[in-house]
Every structure is written in C-alpha cells, then in structure tokens.
Amino acid sequence: MKNSNLHEAKRAKNDEFYTQLSDIEKELQHYTEHFKNKVVLCNCNDAIHGNFSQYFALNFERLELAELICTSYGDGDENGKVCIYHGDKNGNHIPDIEEWEQYELKGKGDFRSEEMIELLKRADIVCTNPPFSLFREYVAQLMAFNKKFLIIGNMNAITYKEVFPLIKENRLWLGINTNGHNMTFISDGEKNDVTAIWYTNLDHNKRHTPLDLYKRYNEEEYPKYDNYDAIEVSKVADIPMDYNGIIGVPITFLNKYCPNQFEIIGIDRYVENNPNYGHRFTINKKEIYARILIKFK
C-alpha cells in the first residue's frame, strides 16, 4: 500500500464516529415532507448496520421513499460494500437482511471514487456523517452535483473559507438542533462528546423565524473594532434592534439566522475590506474570536 493510502486509512480511522440513532431521529423528524418519492444515499456509513441506514429503512414506508442506498468503507484489505433497500416485502415492517440488495464495490468506497460518484448521481438527498477531516471536499462534491443534503460536521466548519461563502449565499445553512451543545458519538465502543452540528440545504421552518430582540444601541455597551467599522456584540441575544450599521456576532448567530431579517456581510478574516485580511478583528489590540458580520435588512 502506498504511503498516501496508509495516511488516508489512518485519517479515516480517526474520523470514525458513529452517530446515535436518537440524534438522527431528533433532527430528521423536521424534514419529513422532503423525502417523498426520493432516493436517499447514506455514504460514509456502515451499510445495513449504520444508524442512518436503520433510520431510513425502518421509516421507509412512512417517508414514502423511492430507494435507499447505503455504503460502507472497506476494512483492511476488503473492498467497500453497497446495500440497497426498496422497502418491506414480507409484511413484518422490519428491514430483514434478505430484503436488501447487496454487492461489493471494486474499490474501498471512498466518496471521491468514480463508482461512488455514480451512486451519488442516482441520489436525490444525501444524509450521513462524513469524515470531519474531509468535510471541505465532501461539501464541494455535493455542491458540484447539485445535491440536497443533511449532514453532520464540526461546528468550526462554519468558519472554513470554502464553507462560509455557501452560508452567506444561502446555499447552505444549519439544521434544527444546532444550539452549540456537544453531540455524543460512539467510537471504538466509547462515547465521545464532539462539538458537531447539522448542515443542510433542505428548508425548514426555524430559518424563517425572526430573532426576538429587546436591546437598544449605545456606544458604551457596543464598542467598535480597532480597524473595522462594525460594533462588537458578544452574545446573540444582545444584538441591538435599532442599529443600522454592520454588527459583529459570534458564529452561534447562525443557529438563529433568519435570511428575511438579516443580511450576512462576511466573516471577519475574509471580508473584502478587512485591512488585515486573513486576521481576526481586535478591540484595544486584543484579538476577538471569529465574528460573522451582519446587518438588518
């Protein structure tokens, strides 16, 4: 095996987190109307036994799915696997093993491979937990093939140079259960809390609910950045309802973001007119953590 492949295998192992079924159910219940007559792909999964697979197989008829395609990455010298489900056939309302069409892939099951791309082309909606270290590439591929998706990623991915423009352009947004709390994953039999959130381009009611505001602007409470014409707001709840200029807010703002209420201007480091492009803003020469720049519509 080439060194590059060894490194990728090690990286894949480090990314091997298994989402709990309870977390999947808690989020997916808000998107029922999107799945009727759709082909769902769960790549980056554990084929039949993955919790994404189980959720969609157990709810196949209720969601009125057309097809469920699940894949798994090959372990060791094994190739990857594809498992396809078309619904309950014996009337027991359980996705029995014999009701799945199964075959082996020619390769390991890397989402970037040609055979996996062919499966992606068949899908209407992708729903899975991709490797965190490959999140940029994964999202770029979904966008390139114009796919609908509901996926899990590290919360810090919001600030990625490749991801944030998609949020700004309303081509990608956060899911329902994204309040900044850790999500519990299972890896190597142990539970781990990871700051992860749902990313999607499936519409939901939460993103059309305006943020309730009660505070008014005053210069003492809302200082401006040293080198950028915007005020600092360290808590989303403290956004002043009467300020018409640019406002810097924490990335947790996106949990409450309503595109009908606010316009996203950019993110501190990469906003075009940042005189220190590539660097975060400062107040009294002290650097402030990542800030999203917004203004009222």
Image: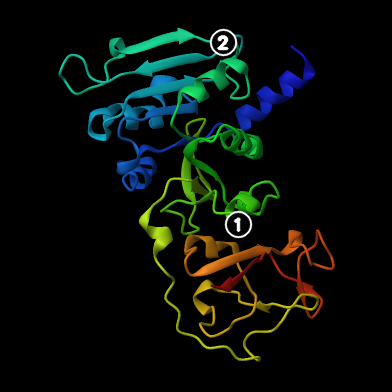
Q: Which residue is mark 1?
A: 168
Q: Which element type, helix, strand or loop, lies under badge 2? A: loop
- Image depth: mark 1 or mark 2 in front: 1
- Kind of residue at disc 1: Lys
Look at the picture and state if 90 lies above or below 237: above
Q: Position of residue 37 (x, y in %)?
A: 31, 30
Answer with left or right where residue 269 lies relative to residue 131: right
Tag 2 or tag 1, which sits nearer the N-term? 2
- Kind of residue at disc 2: Asn
Residue count near mark 1 (Cα–Cα under 10 Å), binned few <14, some 14–19, many ≥20: some
Q: Which residue is mark 2?
A: 79
Residue occupying the point 77% across, 73% down = 282
Picture quadrant where residue 49 is located: top left
Q: Position of residue 216 (x, y in %)?
A: 52, 88
Which quadrant of the figure contains the C terminus?
A: bottom right
Which quadrant of the figure contains the N terminus?
A: top right
